Image (tube, rainbow, N blue to C red):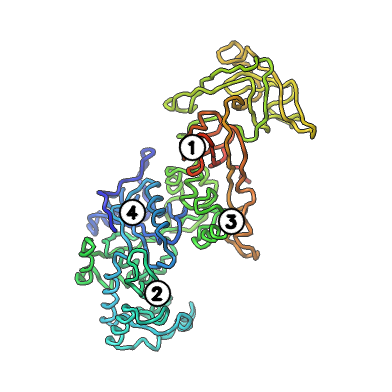
Amino acid sequence: MSTTPPSTPAAPSDAVAPEKKDFIRQIVREDLASGKHTAIKTRFPPEPNGYLHIGHAKAICLDFGVAAEFGGVCNLRLDDTNPAKEDPEFVAAIQDDVRWLGFDWASLRHASDYFEVLYLAAEKLVRDGKAFVCDLSAEQVREYRGTLTEPGRNSPFRERSVEENLDLLRRMRAGEFPDGARTLRAKIDMASGNINLRDPALYRIKHVEHQNTGSEWPIYPMYDFAHSLSDSVEGITHSLCTLEFEDHRPLYDWCVDHVDLANSPELLAPLAAKGLPQEAGKPRQIEFSRLNINYTVMSKRKLTTLVTEGLVDGWDDPRMYTLQGLRRRGYTPASLRLLVDRVGISKQNSVIDFSVLEGCLRDDLDAVAPRRMAVIDPLRLVLANLPEGHEESLTFANHPKDESFGERQVPFSRELWIEREDFAEVPPKGWKRLVPGGEVRLRGAGIARVDEVVKNEAGEIVELRGWLDPDSRPGMEGANRKVKGTIHWVSAAHAVAAEIRLYDRLFSVEKPDDESDGKTYRDHLNPGSKRSVRGWVEPAAAGAAPEQSFQFERTGYFVADRRDHSPAAPVFNRSVTLRDTWAK
């Protein structure tokens, strides 16, 4: 189940970037300079129990980025020690997300690759008198554990003999006991000020079939035990994780030191059957602050609830903060890597404003997204002085700041669609767009005036009739005549009808996780987070490939939906508005 590409390439470089000097990279530089390590090896170890979210993007960029910057390698390791909650669907999505962000792994590993090694390590701890089989129930273990201010009490089973513990552990391995009947616990210190060291569980009984090992194992290792020894097995030099694992570091080190895989070749023997290297090292765990963004929730449990309760349209709903959702929304790998660079790496937890995320996307798409014209809320404008059936083709630049994008031909005709909000029968102060009898420049076509407003029986405006100044056409003497405003348009005779999904933030408050007022994140869902309208786009937009991004002029950045879009039935998702609409 392991694959080994030749190396871990760096993420695509958008520009020559200055050397990064955060505290983690400084540690790596010092370790290389001192000779402690001659090569760097990291890993990204997600549990395949859900889809990756934007917080994982920071870890991915750091794990793979550090390895690449220092000529090392990074493994992708699936922490598959809890099969009841894991699914191959999540495994496939994780691999897709990592590659989409621009990275690849040196080796694809699974914690389950090491189950035999981990079990032999458990037996070694028992033989060394450093682990015991405990019969206390989960509730009793909690009672014995103590509190932050009171020490715990030793389990009544703590002093079992080595022989009895080995016998019970082997019978656990053989599947003799029901779920929850016994655990294997480390024998450390029930009076420790760090509750994680109060004889933590190393193995639990769980008769659940595993996606990789089938029904071979009725016992599964606990996270801290499996994680630390998996790092050691793989020869990881720097084990990078978020700050919530800082209190777990003493247990991480305890497992690495007392099992001592680097000096216990007999424990590594099962790796030969899998074709894996039988070498181990002593990794160093280093913690960094996680990525926190307001107006979001990043708990996998809460994201799962949003999906299972139908509050969103699946894991890749463009309002979700999963990488699959962000990708479908139109976020680019470069924009997320830019976000990670701007946020930086530190040990100080902080909350980033959502506008920083949106700003990174605007900055990236401004440079790489071609321009197109689209009308979202259409109002018909008839240029009555042009003949019936008039058609012509106008030349537009695909990008106003980059000639390399080339040009395109845009059809123009007597009848146009314009945005309804670009006309005001009674204009407010400072209005610079269309009014009865007023003029406005039609982008790239000339200066138009409205002479007549057509309404239906309900008094609603259904059509504008006006006049196009022939002397203001491109290339004519009056083309540069000054008028107050410029609006975009599409030719009604040539435009393609499109579904345009106007997405916004999923939550309406900065701290949807805050339950101090008795409300939950469900109560803060933004009712305006998705609105679907029928609009019109120029033909060059309709022909977009799925996931192709454009700036719809004067409107925002949009992407052709990766699942639903086709040239015959275009579907565009709004990625981000042209400016921050949530600014206070």
Which residue is disc 1 drawn over? 549
Q: Give the label, 1 or 4, closer to the camera.
A: 1
Q: Earlier in the sequence, mark 4 or mark 2?
A: 4
Nearer the N terminus, badge 3 or badge 1? 3
Whole-number angstrom distance, CA of label 1 to CA of label 2: 47 Å
In the figure, 52 relative to 279: above or below? above
Q: Residue 357 in the image: x percent, y percent?
A: 51, 46
Single out the mark in the foreground, 1 or 2: 2
Toward which corner of the image does residue 534 lie, by quadrant?
top right
Taking the spot 32% from the left edge, 45% from the top edge, the residue there is: 10
Residue type at the position of mark 1:
Ser
Query: Mark 4 belongs to which amino acid?
Result: Gln
Judge whether residue 61 can be spotted in this image: no
* Mark 1 / mark 4, whichever is N-terminal: 4
The numbered dot on residue 206 is 2
Mark 3 = which residue? 311
Q: Amino acid at mark 2?
A: Lys
> Which label's residue is closer to the chain start, 3 or 2?
2
> Gap in Å between the C-alphas at discs 1 and 4?
38 Å
Q: Image quarter for residue 474?
A: top right
Query: Above or below — where is 312 with respect to 187?
Result: above
Graded by Cα atoms within 10 Å as few (under 14), some (14 to 19) or many (20 or more), the crowding at tag 3 reads few
Q: Is residue 241 above or below residue 480?
A: below
Residue furthest to the front in view is 568
Q: Position of residue 523 (x, y in %)?
A: 64, 59
Marks 3 and 2 close (CB-CB < 8 Å) = no
In 3D space, how far apart are the residues under numbered discs 4 and 2 (Cα atoms)?
42 Å
**Mark 4 secondary-structure assignment:** helix
Helix, strand or loop at mark 3: loop
At label 3, the amino acid type is: Leu
Give the residue drawn at x 40%, y 46%: 100
